[in-house]
Image (tube, helix red, strand yellow):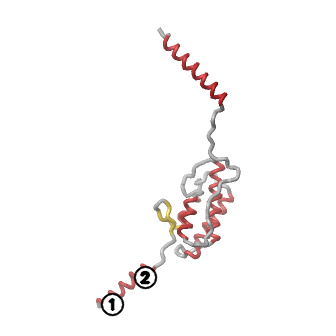
Amino acid sequence: MRFSTLIVASALLVSQALAAAKFNVTINNANNTIVQALEQSVEPGGAGTVPANCTQQCQSILTTFKACDQTDVSCICTNNTAIGLENCQQCLFTALLVQNIRPSNPLVGSATLLSAFSTSCNKTDFPKLALNLTADWDGPQSLHLNSPINIIAVIAAAIIGMSSFYILWNIE
C-alpha cells in the first residue's frame, strides 16, 4: 500500500516538474507572459496620442500572441512575431519622439521589452531586434546664447545689480 502511494506521488511530482512552464519575459526582475507585457505596452494613453497605424500593428501582434498557447515557444518565438513586436514597439517609440513626451509605462516603445523577448526565446537564428531613431530627430538640444547676447546680458545684469545696491545704500 505504501509503495503504490509512493509511486503515485512520485509520478505526480515528476509530471508537475516536467509540465511546460509559461513563456515569460523578465523585465526589471518581474516575470510577465508576453501577452501581459504587451498589454501593458499598448494601454491607452501610454504613448500619448497613439497613431491609428500603431494601434493596428500592436493589436495585430497582441492577437497573434493571444492565439498561441502561452507554453508553446515554437508559436511565440517565430521571426514573424519578433518582427511584429519590433514594429509595434518602433511605432510607439516614434510616437513618443514626435510628441516629445515620456512614456507613462516603461514598456511603451521599449527596447527593454524587445531585449527580454529575444533573451527568452533564446534562438540563434532569431532576428536582431532594436529600436531606431527617426531620420528627422535632431536629439536633445542644449540651447546656448551666442557671445554678443551673453555680453549684453552680463552688462544688463551688472547695471541692475549696481542700481539695486545704490538704491539700498541711499535709503534714509
Q: Is residue 38 visible?
A: no
Q: Is residue 115 visible?
A: yes
Q: Position of residue 15 (x, y in %)?
A: 43, 82
* Residue holding disc 1: 4
- Relative to 31, say whether 95 is above or below: above
Q: Position of residue 17 (x, y in %)?
A: 42, 79
Q: Position of residue 98 (x, y in %)?
A: 66, 50
**Residue type, label 2:** Ser
Picture quarter with the N terminus: bottom left
- Separation of residues labelled 2 and 1 (CA atoms): 16 Å
Circle 1 sits in a helix, a strand or a loop, which is it?
A: helix
Which of the marked residues, 2 or 1, is nearer the chain's N terminus? Answer: 1
Q: Disc number at residue 113? A: none
The answer to which quarter of the image holds residue 93 is bottom right
Residue drawn 53% across the image and 73% down it: 70
**Considering depth in this image, is 81 or 64 the residue closer to the camera?**
81
The answer to which quarter of the image holds residue 2 is bottom left
Q: Disc number at residue 15? A: 2
Residue at the outermost right position: 136
Mark 2: few/some/many CA within 10 Å (<14, 14-19, 20+): few
Residue drawn 69% across the image and 59% down it: 53
Residue at the outermost front position: 147
**Residue type, label 1:** Ser
Q: Specify whether 9 is left or right of 113.
A: left
**Considering depth in this image, is 81 or 153 the residue closer to the camera?**
153
Mark 1: few/some/many CA within 10 Å (<14, 14-19, 20+): few
- Relative to 119, say whether 16 is above or below: below
Circle 2 sits in a helix, a strand or a loop, which is it?
A: helix
Residue drawn 31% across the image and 90% down it: 3
- Relative to 97, say whether 167 is above or below: above
